[in-house]
Image: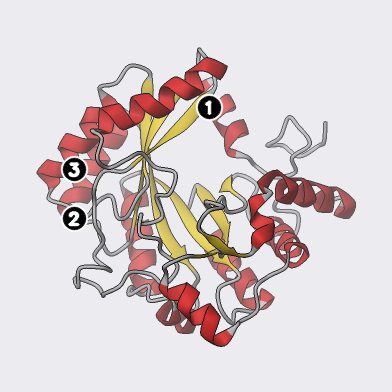
Amino acid sequence: MNEFKYSDSNKRYHTLDFFYKHKFGFKVFKVSLNGGFTCPNKDGTSGYGGCIYCSKLGSGDYAGDRNDSLTVQFMKIKNIMHKKWPKAKYIGYFQANTNTYAPLSILKEKYEEILKIDNVIGLSIATRPDAISDECMDYLEELSKKTYLTIELGLQTIHEKTSKLINRCHTLECFEDCVNKLRKRNINVIVHIINGLPYETKKMMLETVKYLNKLDIQGIKIHMLNITKDTALENMYIKDKFHILTKEEYVDIVCDQLELLRAEIVINRITSDPNPDNLIEPTWLIKKFGVLNEIDKEMLNRNSYQGIKL
């Protein structure tokens, strides 16, 4: 056992599993759902075409089948997990596309359908900072008083040049304003970032984490950029062949990022989990546990911990 406060294993960072275990006292799973939402970055409200890395499934490759009802999606995934952990409880994870981008009546209907299911203890809702209306904010505040609620906000990078390149179509000011509004209502915030975006340097990736560390966020998801079939990013890569991080470079950057994050920030994800059938690069991502093990090894070699450099 190491001396890092937020670990009871070999992990030298604050894992989601540790957080759930100590918050709830039992095994908790997130069940990924496709609520049939679209995105303001696809229909012209914010932009067209979506982010250049976004798959046809709207980053919901492991979410349920949108042709099934939400309850059927939930049960299919839950029944698989239940065989291994029969006493587990669940958080409904609205993953695909932008899950606050609909009239409030539709949002209520979808969220509350999941909350009615036995042993669902909360919701995690993935969205964009430009897609939460004030009316929706007020409803989310009500919801957070009844269940364990987290809002997952895509940021990816703080750098405007990169943000424009990947077609994010929202500003950093918009993101920060959204975080502040959510926290004012005491709603938990998890932020998504991507390492290895085209032409970003290690320094730029560390600057994104330094910025986020100063905000009142409760969690972070660190992804490695993956180039998948039938995306605008695939076309850019074929044309420009920009540098793709090696596994060694990725591990080094992530460990540096962990050292710059407050220890209480929960690391909800530390690598990407692409569908191997659609993945073009980097192929080393397919061996997810190999990446996780290399991060653990590097933190041990450094005798380092999350937050050590603060």
Describe the element under mark 1 as helix, strand or loop. helix
The mark that comes first in sequence, 3 or 2, is: 3
Is residue 141 visible in this depiction of the protein? Answer: yes
Circle 1 residues within 10 Å: few <14, some 14–19, many ≥20: few
- Whether 248 is drawn above or below 293: the answer is below
Q: Residue furthest top?
A: 87
**Label 3, label 1: how many angstroms apart (C-alpha)?**
27 Å
The mark that comes first in sequence, 3 or 1, is: 1
Amino acid at the residue labelled 1: Lys
The quadrant where residue 110 appears: top left
Amino acid at the residue labelled 3: Leu
Residue beneath disc 2: 134
Numbered badge on residue 23: 1
Mark 3 or 1: in front is: 3
Quadrant location of the N terminus in the rendered image: top right
Residue beneath disc 3: 107
Amino acid at the residue labelled 2: Asp
Q: What is the x, y in percent for residue 244?
A: 65, 73
